[in-house]
Image (cartoon, coloured by chain):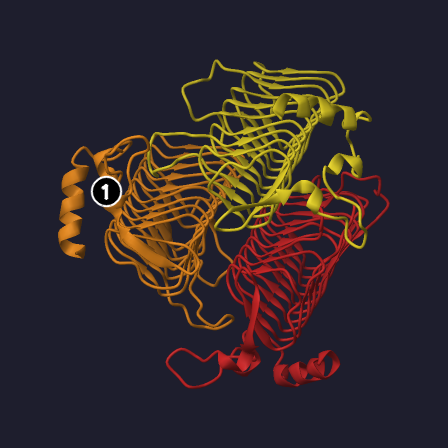
Chain colours: A red, B orange, C yellow
Amino acid sequence: MTNISKKSKIGKNTIIAKSSKILDNVIIGNNVTIEDFCVIGFTSLNNKSKKLIIEDGVKINSHSVIYLDSEIGKNTIIGHRVLIREKTKIGNNVQIGSYSDIEGYCTISSYAKLHSNVHIGQHSKVMDYAWLFPYVILTNDPIPPSEIRKGVLIEPFSIICTRTTILPGKKIGFGSFVGANSLVNKDLKAEMIGSGNPFKERGNIELIKIPGKNEKAYPWHSRFYKDYPKNIKEIYENFKKKFI
Amino acid sequence: MTNISKKSKIGKNTIIAKSSKILDNVIIGNNVTIEDFCVIGFTSLNNKSKKLIIEDGVKINSHSVIYLDSEIGKNTIIGHRVLIREKTKIGNNVQIGSYSDIEGYCTISSYAKLHSNVHIGQHSKVMDYAWLFPYVILTNDPIPPSEIRKGVLIEPFSIICTRTTILPGKKIGFGSFVGANSLVNKDLKAEMIGSGNPFKERGNIELIKIPGKNEKAYPWHSRFYKDYPKNIKEIYENFKKKFI
Amino acid sequence: MTNISKKSKIGKNTIIAKSSKILDNVIIGNNVTIEDFCVIGFTSLNNKSKKLIIEDGVKINSHSVIYLDSEIGKNTIIGHRVLIREKTKIGNNVQIGSYSDIEGYCTISSYAKLHSNVHIGQHSKVMDYAWLFPYVILTNDPIPPSEIRKGVLIEPFSIICTRTTILPGKKIGFGSFVGANSLVNKDLKAEMIGSGNPFKERGNIELIKIPGKNEKAYPWHSRFYKDYPKNIKEIYENFKKKFI
């Protein structure tokens, strides 16, 4: 195939659209699907000996660009027009929504989900089972422009609602909930609600109820299971011991 | 043409760039233009027997992706890099701006206009002659993540200014005006101004004046006609009878 | 090359990916790089005799679309999926981040930098050495929808932090600093800090300190030099004389 570099390796049962380009030093596993008009293994840096590793079962939708010197774990799903730059480490079973812009030098751990148009600044860390909704921005520069990069830390099982901006170096604690349109300028403790601009802590996550019922909506693992391991409750409790 | 599936039908005087792909079960009318690097009839679902219908006179700009199981009405214009997912019903003479993300299971009625980078969550309904400006987001999940989808309703002739976020299940009334950067957490009545975070009703739309004049700026049909039917005033009054 | 129009001119040492299209009336200089899946010289208007001029040393990343009747100055870098419409005049050494949407009829002067996903409405003017961070929006219509276009003016060396919206006709003064998520509804004077919604002036830029130090962070030219001319301090002072 003229669209696949001879310096790259492609696994079994892997389907790559003819219109997509696989450049040098890309290692693609088995059962991977890459849709049309993607550029896989791109670089504009002096790092052409670095590799891009795409593990088994990954699905990459059309028009996406993935740079060399990154890793994408098993069964991860990448949307349309996603951009993933160098030194991005993505775990297994992650979802990256369409139009998301992953600026590199960052980690997105297993089962984390980014909805569409999420912007991940360099040196961010999005931990397991976290959720970032559309147009969330993680920043990193406290005095722009500068060479300082203070990444944001999103701990496991946290929910960051749509259009929230998180300022450099802030930490969103385990299992917490950040309301829509927030401008987060301070850390949020574990299992707490935070929202607004100015950003304020609003109490424990158990205060949020399921609409029309008197049942608590959070932690969300008690009512939402789609595509998660069956023992998600146990996983939550195990992470909780480490983070609280 | 090798880029057009034999299972699809193409009308007369229709121009499709050779670099674009027309997949199976796409029905394209007459006088349609599809620019470069588009994927038309995409699906990742088990619905390959479903159709995508693109009616006469539609124009689709480059790099757009349209899923199977949707309909696009006559003379509608789709910008660059638009994503339209399954079960989207778009009327006639609609405009969808570049970078807009239509998540599916939604309706966008005739003469509605979306400027660039608008995000339409599932189960939204954007009615006739409504305007959504850049980076407007219509959400749908009241307790994310959940399986609940409470769509937003935008009634005819409403104006939603740039960067507004509308929370799940909220209704923007007929002919109303929502100011820039609002976070809409309650319904807005017909022909009223609403803005801010916290979102507040600010009075009747007639309070907004044309800059430098003592003439009212709204309803906008009295001063803006571009690409609309000549009897737009009559259309406004007819809709008003139904919605007020 | 079948992907390059015979009505266009290509300079020496210029590399154009085979998957990209160079349409009619494009004048490309020397040492230019154009990556995959770009459309260069696009138009949907009745202006096919107009030219697009791309000067020496320009780099255009993948999936970008540039319209006829614009100019891009020397050594400017264009990210992935950028859209640049007609009557855009871009200076030398500019950077336009990925996903940015330049709506045309605007000027972006030398050494200005736009981070990713910046939206430049028509009739905007971004002056030399200004910085616009992710998801900044420059608007232009005071009573949408209308035919009125009151552009935003960003004076030299200004900093507009992430997710700021600037309302039509507003001016951000020389060397000033606008905080994240602001909704700018009034002019900001030179070398001042402004932020918030409602937008307020917060004092002189010298009030912002480098984190952990008692040194002033602004003007930024005293501590950040990357890719700028060596005499940036002198340039700042010369511009200051004109603008203050």
Asked whether A88 or A198 is in front, the reply is A198
**Which quarter of the figure has residue C142?**
top left
Amino acid type of disc 1? Pro
Please tell me which residue is depicted at 47% across the width and 27% down the height of the picture: C123
Q: Which chain carries label 1?
A: B
Q: In the rendered image, which residue does mark 1 sit on?
A: B219
Residue C26 horizontal/vertical position (percent): 58, 18
Residue A107 horizontal/vertical position (percent): 73, 61
- Extreme residue toward the front, this view: C203
Q: In this view, does B238 lie to the left or right of B71?
A: left
Q: Is mark 1 on a helix, strand or loop?
A: loop
Q: Is residue B198 at least partly visible in the picture?
A: yes
Please tell me which residue is depicted at 61% across the width and 78% down the height of the picture: A191
Q: What is the count of numbered marks?
A: 1
Residue C234 horizontal/vertical position (percent): 77, 24
Asked whether C219 or C132 is in front, the reply is C219
Q: Is residue C146 left or right of residue C202?
A: left
